Image (cartoon, helix red, strand yellow):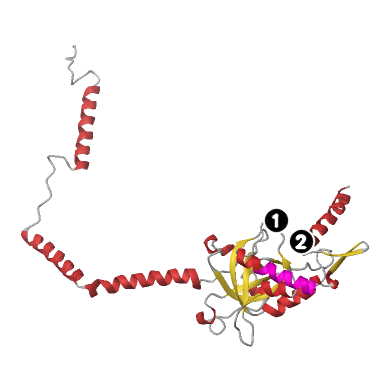
Amino acid sequence: MPWGLTSASSPSGRKDDEGASGFESNKIRLQMTGNDPRRPSPPRPTQNEKSRIDTIKNSVREHLSVPHNWIAPVAAAALTLGLWTFYQSYLRRIPGTDHIAPSFFRRRSLFGKVTSVGDGDGFHMFHTPGGRLAGWGWLRRVPKDRKELKGRTISIRIAGVDAPEGAHFGRPAQPFAAEALAFLESYVLHRRVRAYIYKRDQYERVVATVYVRRPPFFFPRKDVGLEMLKRGLATTYEGKTGAEFGGPKLETVYRAAEAAAKRKGKGLWSKAGLFRSGKQQEFESPMAYKRRMKMLEVPGEQKGKM
């Protein structure tokens, strides 16, 4: 018997299925968008509910119209935020060089206690933010044992100066290297210093101008690098790149101190500080010494490869 074919039906029933699925999808879409005319509208609030909402609004408005009802909570929140920011910026202890934020350099100084002196122009410092006012020395203890200090100090390189090189890695010591080391130890070791930090060098040390207060008067504070230059126990830094003095004003002061020590023949500038080259004696700065040692190492390295 032949089928009666229409636009809404087919022998396979495919047209009916498509129509049904389309109807269902439209129904779901209307329900999701809330435009289904068959969907009952939400009930309107009664007069009692409206009055209750208006009462709540009026009470909130009246509460906020009185200043002391909201000033105290806002002030407390602002104070809490301010104290947290102050703690993060000034009272949070920095355990090592890697923990110093880049924004600190040239803007902030670090206060701490010198725990060890490595050479004539560098030392390690335990950061004690806030000093005695923050309880360091009477409520909070600065470690003394090396095991406790390991990984908890900041390596400082004194800016603008270069002290004589000591004997290490098989190299001979420069004249006055021991004197420079002894002076720095006696001047800052186990004392509180303030370091105005500028940058990190290639050895992960913090380059800084360092100040210390010395007894009996503790005032004015002393620039450690400047004091070394005055005594002829260091030269101004000669590096062509990476030289850091903390500004042109300090560089002028440092070079003037070096010139004065040179005129007076102090320390490195005395006859005892001269380097014998052949039959002549000449001055050799720490930078020139390091270059000469580097050149002497090259033939030895090449010989070892042959």
**Label 1: how many Cα within 10 Å (few below 14, some 14–19, many 20+):** few
Which is nearer the eye, 132 or 264? 264
Q: Is residue 278 above or below residue 224?
A: above
Mark pair 2, 1: CA separation: 11 Å
Residue range in magenta is 253-268
Which circle's residue, 2 or 1, is located before the other in the chain? 1
**Which quarter of the figure has residue 264?**
bottom right
Which is nearer the eye, 25 or 174? 174
Locate the N terminus and report the quarter of the image it occupies. top left
Identify the residue under disc 1: 240
**Label 2: how many Cα within 10 Å (few below 14, some 14–19, many 20+):** some
Location of residue 4 in the rendering, given as x and y in whole percent from the top left corner = 16, 14
Q: Is residue 217 above or below residue 177?
A: below
Identify the residue under disc 2: 287
Q: Is residue 15 above or below residue 143?
A: above
The outermost residue toward the right is 279
Q: Is residue 20 magenta?
A: no
**Which quarter of the figure has residue 279?**
bottom right
**Residue 212 in view in this figure:** yes
